[in-house]
Image (cartoon, grey):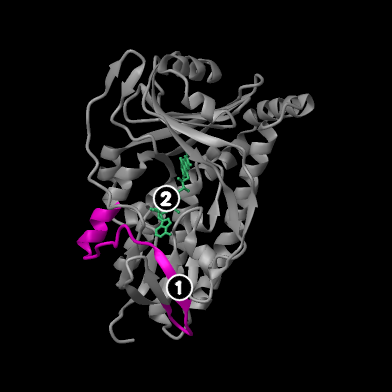
Amino acid sequence: MPGKASFDAIVVGAGLVGLSLTLALLQQGWQVLLVDKRSAPVKPDSKPVSVSGFQLDSGFSARVSALNSRSLTLLNELGIDATWLEQHSALFQGMHVWDGDGTASIEFDASGRIVENHRLEWALLLQISQLGLTPVWQSELSDIECLADEVRIRLSTGEEFLGNCLMGVDGAYSDTRERVGIRVIEWSYDQTSMTTTVQTALPHTGIARQCFTRDGPLALLPLADPQLCSLVWSGRNTFDRMALSDEMLCQEISRESEFVLGQVTAVDSRFEFPLRQAHAVRYAKNNVVLLGDAAHSIHPLAGQGVNLGFADVHSLVSALAVLKLTPTRSMAKIFEKYQRQQRPRNLLMTATMESIKRLFDTDHSFVRWARNTGMDWLDGQDLIKAQLERVASGL
Ligand SMILES: Cc1cc2nc3c(=O)[nH]c(=O)nc-3n(C[C@H](O)[C@H](O)[C@H](O)COP(=O)(O)OP(=O)(O)OC[C@H]3O[C@@H](n4cnc5c(N)ncnc54)[C@H](O)[C@@H]3O)c2cc1C
């Protein structure tokens, strides 16, 4: 097609999953076009912690991800090495989960790292630019045409491109998915998440904590500073909490987290995120494939969204590596293999999150009694706890 640049793959979406996918493809020698509708990110800065009354200016972003060891291995293979991670993330070595509506709790070993999303994005972008790719920012799809063995796209800028395939990594509200007509199964949520950074009187000691409050799960994720945690609180009353004064919010978090880290002494700016649990009925159609939240978005209560997306990248890129050995294999066959591998795993995790959410989202006294008894029983079962550790660590 004269006049139109042609690529091995067109990747739509430069979030954490799209960036890691692009980098993995470039490392395999693919020619990639990467498109995202947002503006080009700016280099993250670093500033010292400052506190004024109950107002915290922590220098940490409110959007963080708890990465399991499988994700860390993938990042390592992509060139985000241990030194970078040590400098830019916080290690967690255990989890403490409890029912705010009872007395039961469970503690188990699980290791991983809490990383600020924008810093990791920047590190991935640096690697991508070193391989000669400049993403197309502030641009989105205005048309997709699936031809026999290629895909033609038009961007909002009017430019047209050809690709051997199109990879939709454009998040939970994926336009790529809509345009190629892949349906989703959706669970409607009446919850949103509030995220911020909090300062606590007691040090977090590298433990990720989660309390199931009456209004939903409240997570305190350890940051590099021993007295700072990233807070993710999902529930129906986020709107009201967003409006509280800093002092009132500190009191509410302290009380609802049962003073697990003493008083919350200061709170940073807050952000609210909508929650959507949706799963695509298929991950691939012809030469188009979906990864990350575009294929499956889940409740953040177990911090697994990015981890599942990174597992998608690993699965797809491993399957695509075969193309070099057997170039006669079609892309569609490879996409089917990826779907066969990832969809059941991701569905299982989605179903598990939904069950946990429902279990803790009830006032029914018998269910409350049963979950407290169950949690206490679980805390005494070493074998089952070892399995929980493996799941939380992504092993
Ligand atoms: C409050 C909260 C806390 C969370 N905590 C964790 C955690 O601790 N651990 C974890 O693993 N997961 C966590 N998650 C989930 C995680 O954030 C998501 O699973 C993850 O960000 C998905 O990455 P992605 O790259 O697939 O999609 P996104 O991050 O949504 O990126 C999609 C990209 O596509 C771009 N885009 C969208 N539409 C278009 C379009 N039409 N054209 C071009 N570009 C487009 C967007 O600009 C964006 O850059 C959390 C989620 C929430 C809401």
Look at label 2 and name its amino acid.
Ser
Point out the image quarter for the N terminus. Answer: bottom left
Look at label 1 and name its amino acid.
Ile
- Tell me residue 212's x, y (percent): 60, 28
Residue under label 1, please give it: 144
Image: magenta residue range: 124-151
User: Is disc 2 in contact with disc 1, using a CB cutoff of under 8 Å?
Assistant: no
Picture layout, residue 18 above or below residue 335: above
> Crowding at label 1, few (<14), some or many (≥20) Cα neighbours within 10 Å?
some
In the rendered structure, which disc, 2 or 1, sits on the residue that comes first in sequence? 2
Q: Is residue 66 visible?
A: yes
Q: Is residue 326 left or right of residue 186?
A: left
Q: Residue 29, located in which quarter of the rendered image?
A: bottom left
- In depth, the one of 373 and 140 nearer the eye is 140
What residue is rendered at 51% in x and 67% in y? 179
Distance from mark 2 CB to nearest ligand 1 atom below 8 Å:
yes
> Crowding at label 2, few (<14), some or many (≥20) Cα neighbours within 10 Å?
many
Residue under label 2, please give it: 71
What residue is rendered at 41% in x and 30% in y? 270
Q: Is residue 362 left or right of residue 31?
A: right
- Tell me residue 20's x, y (percent): 36, 57
- In depth, the one of 47 and 146 nearer the eye is 146
Picture layout, residue 173 above or below residue 272: below
Q: Residue 262, located in which quarter of the rendered image?
A: top left
Q: Is residue 68 left or right of residue 361?
A: left
Distance from mark 1 CB to nearest ligand 1 atom below 8 Å:
no
* Image depth: mark 2 or mark 1 in front: 1
Q: Is residue 49 left or right of residue 12?
A: left
What residue is rendered at 47% in x and 20% in y? 244
Residue 132 among those drawn in magenta: yes
Picture layout, residue 67 above or below residue 147: above
SS of the residue under disc 2: helix
